[in-house]
């Protein structure tokens, strides 16, 4: 019974990929360390996610001074077959932080 409760607490609708993406859409200057702290994952996991997103052309990175800055390619389609008619802009609008 205890194992079931702990599993329920970890379950979320938003994947780490979506959480990272949502952050860099609104704050493209964040470092991997800052993203990791906000999402609650390791810096290494953030680098893997950023690599995945870049490889699939969801983001591009550019060096600005000593930091990396990310640009989101909002016209890219979502990867899941049941959401192929939606693009990244649709997802980002849903995940927009409330002010």
Image: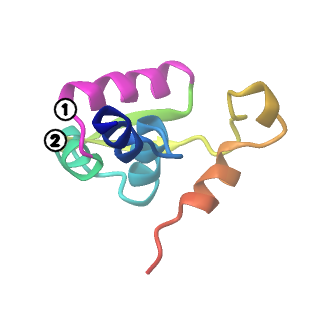
Quadrant location, the N terminus? top left
Mark 2 vs 1: CB contact within 8 A? yes
Percent x, y for residue 46? 29, 32
Callout 2 environment at 10 Å: few (<14), some (14 to 19), or many (20+)?
some
Name the residue at 31% across, 40% down: 6
Residue highlighted by disc 1: 43
Q: Is residue 86 magenta?
A: no
Say left or right for 79 vs 13.
right
Helix, strand or loop: magenta stretch: helix
- Most extreme residue toward the top is 55
Q: Secondary structure at mark 2?
A: helix
Whether residue 53 appears in magenta in the rendering, the answer is yes
Q: Which mark is residue 72?
A: none
Q: Secondary structure at mark 1?
A: helix
Q: Residue at x 45, y 35 (%)?
A: 17
Give the magenta range. Answer: 40-56
At x 22%, y 42%, the residue is 36
Label 2 vs 1, first from the N-terminus: 2
Q: Quadrant of the C terminus?
A: bottom left
Q: Nearer the viewer, residue 28 or 96?
A: 96
Residue 11, above or below 24: above
Q: Is residue 94 above or below residue 8?
A: below
Q: Tell me the quarter of the picture where residue 10 sits.
A: top left
Residue 60 left/right relative to 45 = right
38 or 73, which is in the foreground? 38
Q: Front-most of 26 and 10?
A: 10
Locate residue 24, reporting x and y percent: 39, 50
Instruction: Give the x, y percent position of residue 69.
Output: 33, 44
The residue pinned by badge 2 equals 33
Which residue is at a point 44% across and 41% down the rendered structure image? Answer: 11
The residues tagged by marks 2 and 1 sit, at their Cα atoms, a distance apart of 5 Å
Q: Position of residue 85 (x, y in %)?
A: 84, 38
């Amino acid at each position: 019974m205890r194992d079931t409760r702990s599993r329920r607490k970890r379950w979320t609708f938003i994947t780490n990929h979506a959480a990272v993406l949502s952050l860099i859409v609104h704050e493209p200057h964040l470092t991997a360390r800052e993203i990791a702290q906000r999402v609650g994952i390791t810096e290494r996991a953030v680098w893997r996610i950023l690599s995945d997103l870049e490889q699939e052309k969801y983001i591009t990175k550019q060096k600005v001074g000593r930091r990396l800055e990310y640009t989101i390619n909002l016209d890219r389609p979502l990867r899941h077959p049941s959401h192929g008619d939606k693009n990244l802009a649709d997802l980002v609008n849903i995940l927009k932080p409330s002010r």
